Amino acid sequence: MSGGAPEHREPRLELGDIQGTLLRPPPGACHGVYQLYRIDDPAAARRALRTVLPSVTPATGMDRPRPFTFNIAFTYTGLAALGVPEDSLASFPQEFRAGMAARKEVLGDTGDGDPACWVPPLGSKDVHIGIVIITTAEEELEEPLAIAAGLDGVSRIYQRDVYMPSSGREHFGFRESIGGPYVIGSGIEPLPGQDHVMPGEFVLGHEDESGRVSPMPSPEVLGRNGTYVAFRQFATDVAGFRTYLREHARSRDDEELLAAKMVGRWRSGAPLALAPERDDPELGADPRRNNDFAYHESDPDGLRVPQGSHIRRVNPRDSLTGGIVDTRIHRMVRRGALYGPPLPEGRTDDDGVERGLFFIFMGADLARQFEFITQVWINNGDFAGLGHTKDPFVGTNDGTGTYVIPARPVRRRLTGLPGFITVRGGEYCFMPGLRALEWLAAER
Ligand code: HEM
């Protein structure tokens, strides 16, 4: 088990004031729409926001099925366009004010992932409002889309349909949305193996892992119960991944092993930590077992889960000096959804159709969480004694990447690693609490 359950610290969260997507995972299979808006007329937009407010989904009432969830967030330029006063704007952290595109050096967004190549309007100053709609059935999109269409004083500048198939697998074929922290106070039953993390790491205005209240922008009514969102669109080169595996594996079974060694899990979701030799689909599908492991005692040398694999980099659990390094300060709430059709099974040539994932990474501190993980853990292996190597699955590799798979009697070394994902764009947003939304929508 990684992480304990310090029950005396269980705080009460104001679930009715926190937007649902932060604390409530989406239903397994789902459909959704991601939209971006530009504010043209601030007074009209504020009025429209007041009419939309009752439809914004809080983190309560998840005991009964919902036809849809509707959540809303703002970029820094969006808050300014809405008329948020200067002193309040100045109280937001520097990286949020700069915006994701301006943080390209930190995030490694160069080459094809450079903001200059992003899908318009991503990365431009026109992106002001982001809306995320999720439903369990496609026909149920009609109502939330009509609500969004009622927004006045704004222009819709981007829209993508997203989905998660019932297999729960992303385009490369791996089960998604397994590892994630248990947010103390969220009222959800924690699963075995989840880190128990103080709510202030994710929800502004609450105690965090350092024992302090996470800093908030002012005034308090705006900051409290909000969170920051790193919204990222990644194109996935599925044909490239399959081809790389085919060219570097010794057999078809070995292709599966290499894929698992890159990610740290088999495609079924079964963790290599618990199923080191072969896939175990039942384990992969069992949420009470598939995340219940650590690394330090059972796998110090990475013989099961290589230190450089995707999941061991982005959440080293107790790997780093036996848990002395507190990885809880680098956790995020992560939600992913797919876009584009799947590449047919077995096809290794590119069909020219773009497919990928939208992620929203949420937390109280963009720099310490999303940026740190991307810069230090994904794109530089020094933290784990791996030198300047990158995540073999999602790192910014350029065809010269290497990846070491510890094994006995001899380790394996993959070379010539290309990048399998390309950043197509993204934005930093602030997802306010519901009272804060009222404050933002009020007459000025
Ligand atoms: C297209 C890009 C990506 C793909 C296809 C991808 C895929 C996956 C898969 C298959 C897993 C294992 C299943 C799970 O635990 O949910 C995973 C875990 C995870 N990924 Fe990614 N990922 C991507 C990008 C990223 C990025 C950019 C970050 C961080 C900035 C990230 C952070 C995480 C985290 C925190 C976990 C959970 C690890 C754990 O707790 O063991 N991923 N990802």
Image (cartoon, grey):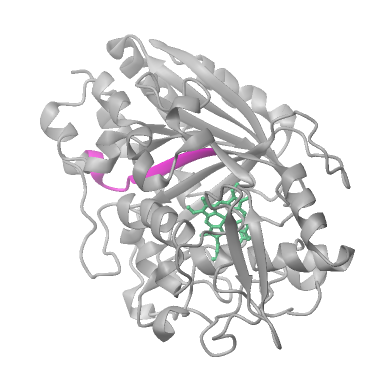
From the top left corner, tell me how far across and down residue 235 is, in percent: 62, 37
**x%, y% of residue 106?**
35, 47
Q: Is residue 377 above or below residue 112?
A: below
Instruction: Tell me: 434 left or right of 250.
Output: left
Q: Nearer the viewer, residue 323 or 64?
A: 323
Residue 238 visible? The answer is yes
Q: Quadrant of residue 153?
A: top left
In reply to whether residue 69 is colored magenta, the answer given is no
Q: Position of residue 248 (x, y in %)?
A: 77, 61
Compared with residue 67, is residue 13 higher up or lower down, i.e. above or below?
Answer: below
Residue 225 forms part of the magenta stretch = yes
Residue placed farthest to the left in the image?
Answer: 87
Is 265 or 145 nearer to us in this picture? Answer: 265
Q: Quadrant of residue 221?
A: top left
Start and end of the magenta stretch?
A: 222-233
Say which residue appears at 29% left-offset and 52% top-offset: 204
Question: Ligand 1 is found in which quarter of the picture?
Answer: bottom right
Residue at coordinates 40% horizontally, 70% vertically from top-left? 383
Q: Is residue 172 visible?
A: no
The quadrant the C terminus occupies is top left
Who's the residue at 80% across and 72% down the image? 279
Residue displayed at 33% across by 10% down:
44
Quarter of the figure with the N terminus: bottom right
